Amino acid sequence: MQIVVADVDALGAEMAVEVERLVQADTLSCALTGGPAGMIVLGALRSARPDWTRVSLYWAEERAVPPEHPGSSFGLAYRMLLAPLDRPGPRVFPMPAAQPDLERAAEDYDGLLEHELGGGPLDLAILGVGEDGHVAGLFPRHPALAATTRVVAVSDAPRPPVRRLTLSLTYLAGSARLWFVALGERKRSLVQAAVRRAGGDTPFERLVREAADVTIFTDQSVRR
């Protein structure tokens, strides 16, 4: 596990440089997040200058809203990253969370990942961290944590909107690299517990323990 501690601007610059390095070495399949962390990540990616045609973008979570809705993770990425690009862009695979049948939408996206990645893992998943330790659409003690598929339909999330699609804990844990963005004083105790491997059971702490290659980007000082 690696910890990168810096102010927000420096964290964004570090992520941009690392994405450029990864893309220079090989093609890159990357799952994005939404929300406040997504804004930081997307700002960093917008400043990066990789060959975007070597990148395929997926989503780790999407709310069951249309793309033009302010809460859409894909809509945020379109406004902040995709629309402003002044050169050929990445391949883009948004989650079909606006479909009425959320279970069918989860199956469809699961099949898309199977087809596009040949049954393999993501090269990179970039996730925010909630104050309760939730990541993507995976909340503490929620039944969705037990899913063994790649994609899970959540119809009863503990905070609105209650209907979402999310990549499963199992599939995220299998990613070649996991990056977490944990900003603000309220995240400090979570990051500290994860770094010390204190045995907590939040989705964040479980992924830190279970994934092979984890980097936490934070603006909070933590002790090993």
Image: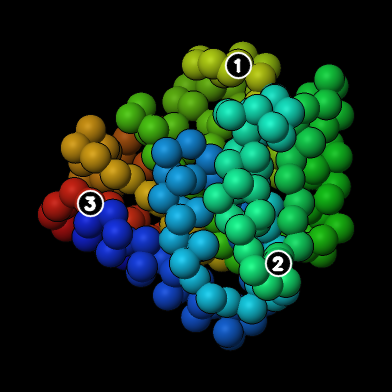
The disc, 1 or 2, on the residue closer to the chain's N-terminal end is 2
Q: What residue would you read off at disc 2?
A: 89
Residue type indicated by callout 2: Gly
Residue type indicated by callout 3: Asp
Labelled disc at residue 43 = none
Q: What residue would you read off at disc 1?
A: 162
| Residue count near mark 3 (Cα–Cα under 10 Å), binned few <14, some 14–19, many ≥20 | many
Tell me the quarter of the image containing the C terminus. Answer: bottom left
Report how far apart the C-alphas of labels 1 and 2 lie in the structure: 32 Å
Q: Is residue 173 visible?
A: no
Q: What residue would you read off at disc 3?
A: 219
Residue 181: x percent and y percent?
Answer: 38, 49
The disc, 3 or 2, on the residue closer to the chain's N-terminal end is 2
Residue 16: x percent and y percent?
Answer: 44, 69
Residue 148: x percent and y percent?
Answer: 69, 39
| Residue count near mark 2 (Cα–Cα under 10 Å), binned few <14, some 14–19, many ≥20 | some
Residue 127: x percent and y percent?
Answer: 48, 47
Q: Is residue 14 visible?
A: yes
In the picture provided, is 138 more to the left or to the right than 101?
Answer: left
| SS under mark 1 | loop
The disc, 1 or 3, on the residue closer to the chain's N-terminal end is 1
Residue type indicated by callout 1: Val
Residue ID at (21%, 45%): 192
In the picture provided, is 74 more to the left or to the right than 157?
Answer: right
Residue ID at (23%, 33%): 186
Camera-nearest residue between 91 and 131? 91
Report how far apart the C-alphas of labels 1 and 3 lie in the structure: 30 Å
Report how far apart the C-alphas of labels 3 and 2 lie in the structure: 30 Å
| Residue count near mark 1 (Cα–Cα under 10 Å), binned few <14, some 14–19, many ≥20 | few
